[in-house]
Image: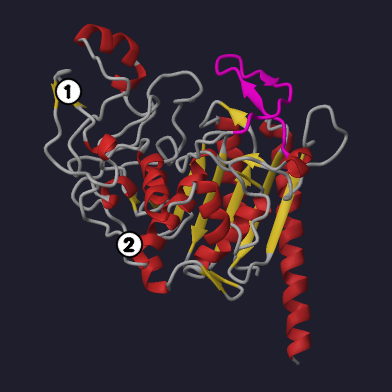
Amino acid sequence: MKKLILILLSTTLISCSQNINKDLKEKINYSKIPAVVMGKINKNGKMVFFSNGPSRWNRNDTINENNIFRIASMTKAIGSVAALQLVEQGKITLDEPLDDYLPNMASMKIINENNEILDPTNSITLRHLLTHTAGFGYWFTSEKLSKWNNIKEEIGWKENYQPRLFESGTAYMYGTNIDWVGRLVENISGMNLEDYFRQYITGPLEMNSTWFNVPNELESLVVSSSYRDIDSGELIKNEYKKRNKTSSFNAGGGLSSSPKDYGKFLACMLNKGELNGVKILNKKTFELMNQPQLDTFKTTHRYVPVDNVDTKARGDKDNFFDSHDNWTLAWAFEENSINRPIGTAYWAGFFNTYFTIDFKNEFALVYMTQILPFNDIHSYNLFTSYERLVYENLNAE
């Protein structure tokens, strides 16, 4: 009887997957996405992928879940897990001042709305960094930072860094906070971030295609990228160039990974920090990490008009992240969606990669392509179409 049930379940899953693939092929034809991999990951680690297009423009192959993509800000979730491991071990707390750990960060000056330069009065904590409430921004989320080269000359800015934009704990702005989390992990652990991730996260989870510096033997798996002209919609395919090795590891956006590898990480998160007997976080720590943090001030995450970011509206969501949603210690927390249940985790990467973790229905989605600008409407629409198809077929499973 058990064998029959397993056969029927497997047949149903295959049938649902085939239905989704058929619909996706139709949507791909209209999407203007030259190469993409999309996948659904179940709690037990089972993964089903759909792929289309070549891995590189000069190849006659089909991209797949083993190919390697730059995942940019999807690195942040892994960096946050690293920090929570240190919290779990009692090596740091969420709310102690970081002045002694990161003195250069702690002394960074603030520029207010009137372009006045101020010394900080509040200390920055790990919670501030993980929740993007420490005052750091990005050039594509802050109007002031997008025009910084002009502003700094006007106000006589003498420092060799961009300023913070507000006192820690007083507002939310998506920015370079997790880069500082990476520095903190390195300082406390005594390891560089590449080695730390390999020893405590990506190595144990057998994410063997996930690196800051992709090993030479995996270089053939790295995919090509492209750029879409926002005005004309024309897609320009970039000539493939091998990335230079780095010794500065960026926890906010430096990793490359494959859809299959990142699927392992997502499956681990679905299981609250554990996968196939490998535990990278205790359940209690995971639940702490996944709690929404911005109850006192939630502000809209908006992209300012700059190169490499498309600022057009995105239907029911305001540029992927809106003022109705929240932020945990690792990712965005869904509070306003047509498809996703409240509490679904999600985020994205600058090259139009996306993930969601639906804890209620016990599955995750991963979507990877390599297109600039970020927030590309064709890529966003294809991802949301895939997501809708998955939810429409849930009952059939």
Q: Is residue 359 above or below residue 366?
A: below
Q: Is residue 66 visible?
A: yes
Residue shown at the point (22%, 53%) measured from the top left? 295
The residue carrying mark 2 is: 91
Q: Which callout, 2 or 1, points to the residue nearer the camera?
A: 2
Q: For residue 244: magenta?
A: yes
Q: Is residue 209 above or below residue 377?
A: below
In-front residue for pair 108/164: 108
Q: Residue furthest front?
A: 190
Q: Quadrant of the C terminus?
A: bottom right
Residue 127 spot, x, y in % from top left: 28, 52
What span is colored magenta in the figure? 222-245
The picture quadrant where one finds residue 235 is top right
Left or right: where 114 falls relative to 199: left
Residue shown at the point (20%, 33%) measured from the top left? 166
Q: For residue 300: magenta?
A: no
Q: Quadrant of the N terminus?
A: bottom right
Left or right: where 283 falls relative to 105: right
The residue carrying mark 1 is: 113
Q: Is residue 393 visible?
A: no
Q: Amino acid at mark 1?
A: Glu
**Secondary element at image label 2:** loop
**Secondary element at image label 1:** loop
Left or right: where 344 falls relative to 367: left
By secondary structure, the bulk of the magenta-drawn segment is best described as loop
Residue shown at the point (61%, 21%) measured from the top left? 228
Residue 230 spot, x, y in % from top left: 55, 18
